[in-house]
Amino acid sequence: MMTGRGRGGRQQADLPPADDAAAWFSGRLPDGWFTGAPEVTCDRDEIVVVGELPALETAGSGTDTGNGPDRDDAAAAEAGRIARFREDTREQRIRIARQAEARYQRKVAWGVRLGGTRELFTTASVPVMTRLRQPERIVLDTLVDAGVARSRSDALSWSVRLVGRHADEWLGELREAMSRVDELRARGPASD
């Protein structure tokens, strides 16, 4: 009998679906935290909730060129607002995260966007085991030797981010197709 568990522990089939996580968080979060519905992304290990904070009111002269002291002041103001939000909402975020973790059996991480700043709070760094043949290891070692990455692990993470950035459209289509397969699998053949 298959239990859905491999040597690595929990498998995807063991997890409750998180298809409704975005709606659940939108309904659960206090009014006024974010300017709209938060961006909610899920994988097998973690749910990341990122919301847009209300824009800062500028007290400047309106001559900001996008760099220099005005931009530095704006970045400092954004960092201060984000720090305040993080401290002021910590207890509520922990309470909401615990409820979501019980519901979805995944860790919850938080983040915010404000102006040109996006900051994530305490996200999971999950080890992933993989077996690589020499040609793939040589690629990773080249990235390390060139100073692009500090280690093979860092090089692999860098490579995954690069592929994700350049293959976003294709990965989106693949996720859509997988979602359709899941729907068909759940429906199964009609029994008479």
Image (cartoon, rainbow, N blue to C red):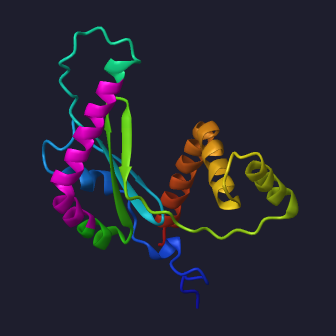
**Residue 41, placed above or below residue 62:** below
State the residue in front, 167 or 89.
89
Q: Write the residue at 61% across / 67% down.
A: 128
Q: Is residue 156 left or right of residue 54?
A: right
Membership of 96 in magenta stretch: yes
Which residues are drawn in magenta? 72-97
- In this view, the residue farthest toward the right is 134
State the residue in front, 147 or 110.
147
**Residue 107, placed above or below residue 179:** below
Q: Write the residue at 29% across / 26% down.
A: 73
Give the image location of residue 43, x and y in percent: 47, 60
- Screen quadrant of the N terminus: bottom right
**Residue 126, placed above or below residue 71:** below
Q: Write the residue at 52% across / 53% down.
A: 180
Q: Quadrant of residue 61?
A: top left
Q: Would residue 20 be visible to someone looking at this image?
A: no
Give the image location of residue 172, x and y in percent: 55, 43
- In this view, the residue farthest toward the bottom is 1
Does the magenta stretch mainly form a helix, a strand or a loop? helix
State the residue in front, 179 or 11.
11
Membership of 191 in magenta stretch: no
